[in-house]
Every structure is written in C-alpha cells, then in structure tokens.
Amino acid sequence: MLYAIHKWKFWKVRAYFENNPDAISTIFENGQTVLHVAITAGRLRIAKELITSTSIENIQHLETQDKSGNTALSFAAGSGMMEIAKCLIEKNNKLLTIPDAHDKLPVQLACRAGLEDMTRYLYSNTPSECLDGAYGFHLLEECITKKMFDIAFKLLSYFPKFAIYKFFKDSSIPIISTLAQTPPPFFKGKQLAFWGRWLYNSGPLVSILPKFLTRHIYELKLMDENAQNKVTCLILIYFPANSYNLTTEHQSIYRENQK
C-alpha cells in the first residue's frame, strides 16, 4: 500500500481504495494513516480525495495522531499545503485545536516554519478561547520572532495581558519591551494602519503610560507611519497587570514569568 501511494498514478490509487474501502483506515507502525503518508509524500491529489471521501461517521479518523503527535493538519500546516489544510478544516475544524507531541497547535507550527499565509489562515480559524492562554502567548512569541506583526497585534488586542509576560522563559525582557526595541521598518503600515490611526489619535490613552514611554511616543510622533505603528503597540498593550481578570491558568503563567 505504501508503494501504491508513493508511486501509482492517481486513478489507480483511487480505484484501489474503491475496491478496498477498509484500507483507508489502515494505521502503520509509526501511527500514521494513509492520509498522513499521502501528505508527507506530496501526493496532494490523493490526499484531497481521501479527505473529501471521508464520511461523517468516520470524520474522527482525520484526528488520528502518529507517534509524534502529528495529525494530518499538523503536516499540512508545517509544510504550507494550503489547499489540504482548507479541506481538512472544512471537514473537521476540531483539528485546529489538537496539539502535537511538543504541545504545538497547527497555527504555531505554521508560524515557526515562517509560513505567513498559512499562519494567517489558521489563526483566523482557530477558536479564540483556544488562544486565551499559553497557546496564544507562545504563538505571540513566534509571531514576533518571525516578524508577523499583524498577527502579533491582533493577539495583543484580544489578550493585552500577554504584554507583561516575559519574552521566552529564559528572558528578563517582557513582550512590551521587546516590541519597543523593534526597529520601525519592521512595522508594515498597510497591515496596521487602522490601529495606528485609531490609537495614535487617542490622546487620553497616553496618560496611562510611564514617563519614559510618553517621551518615546512623542519622538515617534515625529516619524513616519511605520514608526507610528509602534506607538499603536505601546498604547494598546501597556496596562497594569492587576487590571486584568486573569483566569487560574493566566495567573499561573504570569507568576511563572515573574520568576
């Protein structure tokens, strides 16, 4: 069967599974399904056929994880296979919330691989409640590292408490300081123009910032639109930690980040 998936022409593989429907549910020694194999082999047409032909009764089969904890979506997300990812999510959107053995969601795998379009697509479909905690914060770290600031700002606008967490555990620098030190050219005006205009013109918000940030913002106001987008970030996310209604999970993350 493995040889067939890797080498046979599409029509021949499809005919084989039509004549042997039980073969589709085969799980190999490494825990992978036929769909896993088709995706990793780059046989996208076969993979798409396997997904679309999955019945409602067998939809949970798409959630099967191999011995490394990877679902079919994990592979598609980390490899930039957008069409396959869309097919999988349309069939079973629960896949968006299943982490791999390293506790990484599909959107995190895409971000870590530097796949901007895939990351944006998966982020826009991942339930917000799934990101309101460790998954969301670690995605934010990855977005900043990969300079996907449009997604980073969206995360911070939904979860401003992330601003007080340290940028990676071994760092003494919180997210807000990391962003404040980011060179203005990395901030793309087209991505963040709305937030830039809205918050840049919100003068009263500046009063909540410490003096050193206020002076920094005044200097940035004299700069171009890219720099103004940095103002957006500073105003948006700088709130006292005690002002958040943190859940138990968030309080735990906060305490861990203060060590």
Image: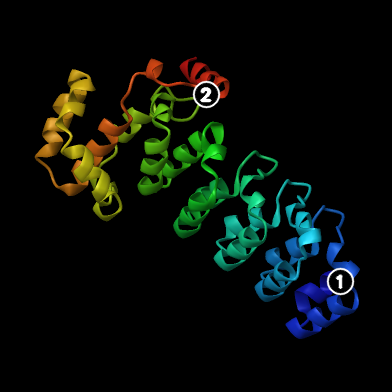
- Which image quarter is the N terminus in? bottom right
Q: CA distance from mark 2 to mark 1?
A: 47 Å
Q: Amino acid at mark 1?
A: Met
Mark on residue 1? 1
Question: With respect to residue 26, does 123 lie above or below?
Answer: above
> Left of 209 or right of it: where is 43?
right
Could you say where residue 76 lies in the image, as x and y percent from the top left? 62, 60
Q: Report if residue 147 is visible in the image.
A: no
Question: With respect to residue 119, does 5 lie above or below?
Answer: below
* Residue at 28 percent of width and 48 percent of height: 192
Q: Residues within 10 Å of mark 1 (few under 14, many from 20)?
A: some
Quadrant position of residue 10: bottom right
Q: Report if residue 192 is visible in the image.
A: yes
Q: Secondary structure at mark 1?
A: loop
CB within 8 Å, label 2 to label 1: no
Could you say where residue 217 lies in the image, as x and y percent from the top left? 17, 31
Q: Amino acid at mark 2?
A: His
* Residue at 19 percent of width and 42 percent of height: 228
> Left of 91 or right of it: where is 207?
left
Mark on residue 137? none
Q: Residues within 10 Å of mark 2 (few under 14, many from 20)?
A: some
> Left of 138 or right of it: where is 93?
right
Could you say where residue 139 lies in the image, as x and y percent from the top left? 50, 40
Question: With respect to residue 37, does 155 lie above or below?
Answer: above
Q: Secondary structure at mark 2?
A: helix
Q: Earlier in the sequence, mark 2 or mark 1?
A: 1
Question: With respect to residue 86, does 180 lie above or below?
Answer: above
| Front-lying residue, 121 or 44 | 121
Q: Which residue is mark 2?
A: 250
* Residue at 64 percent of width and 53 percent of height: 74
